[in-house]
Every structure is written in C-alpha cells, then in structure tokens.
Image: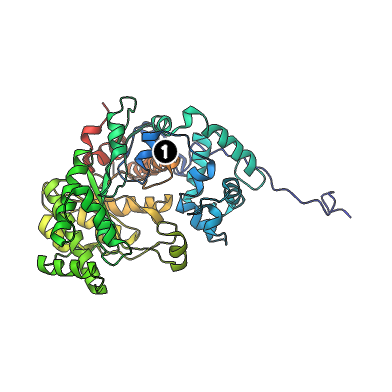
Amino acid sequence: MTTTTGRPASTPVRPPVRALAPHPDRLLPADTGLRDLARSIYQQVSGAPIYSPHGHVDAAVLAENRPFGNPAELLITPDHYVTRLIHAYGVGLDQLGVNTPDADPREIWRLFCSHWHVFAGTVVRYWFESELSEVFGLTVQPSAETADDLYDQLSEQLARPDFRPRELFDRFNIAVLATTDDPASDLSAHQLLAADPDFTGTAVPTFRADRYMTPNVPGWKGFLEELAAAADIDTGSYAGLVEALRNRRAYFKQNGGTATDSGTADAYAIPLPDAEAERIHRAALGGSVAPDEVVAYRRNLLYQLAAMSAEDGLVMQLHADVVRNYDQASFAAYGPDTGHDLPGPATFTAGLRQVLNDFGRSDTFRIVLFTTDETSFSQQIAPLAGFYPSVYVGAPWWFIDTPAAISRFRAAATDSAGFGKTSGFIDDTRAYCSIPARHDMSRRLDAGFLAGLVATHQLGEDEAYEIAGDLAGSVPVNTFRLEKYVRS
C-alpha cells in the first residue's frame, strides 16, 4: 500500500530541516519607510559596548576561565526561561538537569531540540536563534532530527580556546558586567579579575542581602553566622546585623561595587522602632517569630537598606512583587529560582512612600524600580521617576522582557519619565552566551520606537540618533554610577 505521495504507508514522513538564519531586519518596523530609518539608527549602536549592570553570571566563571562543560550545562539547565516552558509540556525538571547532577547532557539537549517548536513566537526562541547563529555559527534549527549533530558541533566549539568565558567576554564587547553577590562573599573572584592585567574588561559585584531579611526562612540563623564571620561583627542582635550589613556594603564598594539589589515579596519599606526590631530578631533566633512579625521585620530592613544607600551612594535596585516558589513540590525537590515563580501586582506607590519622602530628593540616594506587572510602568513607576530625582525606571524584567512588552514599556515610561530616567537595558541573566542577543534585541526595538517618533514629528532625526546612543551607553552608565568604568 502506498500513500498519495508515492511513499510506502509504513515510511514515516520526516519533518524538514529548517535553516537557522535570523533576518537582518528582525524586530524593525514592518513599514518600509520606518524600517529604513530604524535600520540606520540601529546600525549606529549595534556594535556599541555592552553595559550589563544587573545579572547573575558568577564572577568565578571569568576568573577561572575554564572551558564550558557541554551545551546542556551552558545553554539549557541554568536557564529557567527554557526549563519552565519545556516543563509546561510535561517534561520533568530533573530530566532537564535542574539540580540533578547525574542527568545525561546529551539527553537534555535532545529534549530541548525536540521541543524547539514550543518556543515559536517567544522571546526565548528569538534569543536562541540569534545566539546559536551569531555566537556559534549554527546553520540549521534545533529539532529531534538535528539534535545530535548540533550537540557535536557545539561541543567541538566549546573545547576551543576562543570559546572560553574571557574570550567570549571580549567578543561580546562587554564593557561592564555586574554580578549578584551575597554580603558574606569574600569577592575573591572579583579581586583576581581586578588584579589580572590579561583581563581587559570589568566585572563588579552587587550587594544582595535578601537571605538575611526574612527571619523565618530555613537556615536564617546560619546565614547570620556566615555574615558575622565575614564582617567580624556579632549578628546575634538586630543592631549587630545592621552594622554587619553596613560593614559589608563598604567592602563591596571598596571592591568596585556601585549597586545593591533587593528581591522582596512587596515594595513596602516601613521602619520599626529599634527596640521592636530587636525584639523580633531575638524571637526569630529563638524560633518563636509570628508571620506578621516576619513581614514587619523584612519591610523594616528594606527601609534600612534604603537609608544606607542614601548614606553610601550605592544604587539601590528593587525587584519586588514576585510570588516566589509558587509550586511547593518543585521548590521542595529543586529549590528556588527553578522556574516556578510568578508575577504579582505592583506595590511601589504605597510601599515606598516613606522612603521617598525621607530620601527621594537626596543627591546620594538612587533607586531603580523593576516590575513584572507592566501596568505599573504608567501607573506607578514612571510617574514616581517623573517627579523624584532619585527614582529611575528599570527596564522590563523577567516575564516582560519580550519584544512586545519592551515596546509597550517604551511608550508607557516615556510619557511620564522620558528616556533619561530609565535604566538602559538590563539582561538579568544566568545564560552567559545570551547577553549579546538580549542587548541587541533592545537596541533594535529602541531604534524602531525612535524612528516612529521621528515619523510622527515628535522628535528630530538627529535627536533620535543621539538618544539611541545614550540608551546603550550614558543612560546605564549614569544610572548605575559606572562612570569610572567607561571605555575611552
């Protein structure tokens, strides 16, 4: 028996092998007139140095400069953007290597390739197409049929000296890469990089004190002991904890840090009387802290961190209002930051009122607000940035760092805050090789937005070129106080 195509009925129809060839005008406007101008604006900034003021690449990766292990370890397992969507189609996180060290990397890669179609239309697909084509030179799309060949090609490349982390750092044209670090970290990797004349880039630490702020989390007492050892200050009291955090901030600043970060359940920053904070601290050490006391303690510490930023000038980043560890079974099995966090409604206007009344007009205080609730750009964050000298609008982050959402962000934020009170693009990634693709995406979208303003006579063409350059350079540099790291 044969089919109408002439093939025997038993012969499976193989899907076509599709070329991997990102279009040079991707994300630029569909209108040809706008596209020509947007293309010209984009070309001016396409090769500009990358300033990455917030991300999660470990500085030790650069300090040690070891070859990356395999394609799955580099591109799939650490990237919860990837693993969460494949999981949504019934694949276990353990099958993707999440906190499963003995998982077969080739099988992980095969799972990714066989699920390539689920990423159609997503920003992950966009990043991967750019990354696989432009960083690794692949010419066919991932699929079940191409998985093994692609894995072998990538493995061969990753073994080459020019694909080691530092060599890629230079090829990506990264001027500054900010890491995210615990206050107890000795920052030894940063110190090695700063002292190494062969490392021509800049990696700076970012102070993130989240695990000390919520006194009912498992291990909190141990965290305090680690901080005490690092600062040589007793953290058995609330006053000691505050002093230890202040001490470590100074250490981070001495080691090149210009910013802090806080990822909190909400944006409320409300001070407590010292005696009440001390009482809760001691109750937590004794294991008898109440849920409402936990919230009050966390909100108080967020206020204290803001007060410290007003003193020492470290730029305060606030990534708030995410529902963390939503899936209890996944959290128990795989831990945090493994794809089961969800967006929540923003609380900036109400939550930061006292902080901004106390420090919002300070010359030293600066706060960059990030949200996963895009309605808050026009309703809360941009209006705050449009009044307070200290407030800056953080770029779309996490669930909304997509082409469509970034375009909506530009319109929403520009109405109230203009361009100069935004942060510049923030890649916020653990996926090292996706950094250039993410920044390139933003530059293309900004070029299209600016071309639209020129076409509607809201902006002169010369201004559009100037603003595009600022968004890639002086805007993130000024926002995050990176001036001393600017390349001449």
Residue under pointer 1: 436
Position of residue 57 relative to residue 353, above or below, is above
Pick the residue in front: 246 or 473.
Answer: 246
28 with respect to 5 (left or right): left
Pick the residue in front: 278 or 473.
Answer: 278
Amino acid type, label 1: Pro
Pick the residue in front: 458 or 347.
Answer: 347
Tell me residue 349's x, y (percent): 22, 63
39 with respect to 177 (left or right): right
Q: Is residue 119 visible?
A: yes
Other residues around mark 1 within 10 Å, as few (<14) / some (14–19) / many (≥20): many
Q: Quadrant of residue 153?
A: top right
Q: Is residue 368 visible?
A: no
Position of residue 95 relative to residue 351, above or below, is above
Q: Residue at x 54, y 53 (%)?
A: 96
Tell me residue 160's x, y (percent): 51, 29
Tell me residue 479's x, y (percent): 23, 43
Q: Residue at x 44, y 65 (%)?
A: 332
